[in-house]
Image (spheres, rainbow, N blue to C red):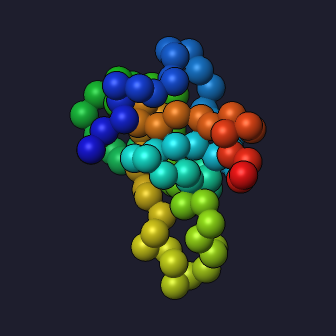
Amino acid sequence: MSNEAWTDFKPGDAPVPVGVVVEFRGRDYEVEEHITPRPSTPDPKENYPDGVAYVLWPVGVAKKFGNRDQSVVQVRRTSFRVKTVDQTKEC
């Protein structure tokens, strides 16, 4: 499943800072870390246009070792969109 059809990325955008909430695959995640794209990535400049791969942590899930399998690794910037402050507030 891909979000590339509705991402908010624009060429030249800087990496999304750690701690920002994003929407990926219909769920809210927090950017936990920037990592280097895998060396075997074909055409890394096209696939990772901001130069980093992302580690995303699901919002509302406790950050502890037993939940590590809930995180998502090697996410492309073109596969998610940044949530605005108003979109992340709970009703």
Question: Which residue is at the front of the view, 44 or 20?
Answer: 20
Left or right relative to 66: residue 15: right
Q: How many marks?
A: 0
Q: Nearer the viewer, residue 60 or 50?
A: 60
* Residue under the image location 48 percent in, 52 percent down: 27
Q: Could you tell whether 11 is left or right of 33 in the image?
A: left
Instruction: Return the x and y of residue 68 as percentages of the image width and height.
Output: 50, 74
Horizontal arrangement in the rendering, residue 89 relative to residue 35 (left or right): right
Q: Position of residue 58 (x, y in %)?
A: 54, 61
**From the viewer's perspective, is residue 45 above or below residue 66?**
above
Residue at figure coordinates x 56%, y 15% from the top left = 12
Asked if one can make out residue 73 in the rendered structure from this viewpoint, the answer is yes
Q: Residue 62: where, in percent of width, then height?
A: 63, 75
Give the residue displayed 43% in from the left and 73% down from the top: 69
Q: Quadrant of the N terminus?
A: top left
The vertical placement of 33 against 17, above or below, is below
Q: Residue at x 68, y 46 (%)?
A: 88
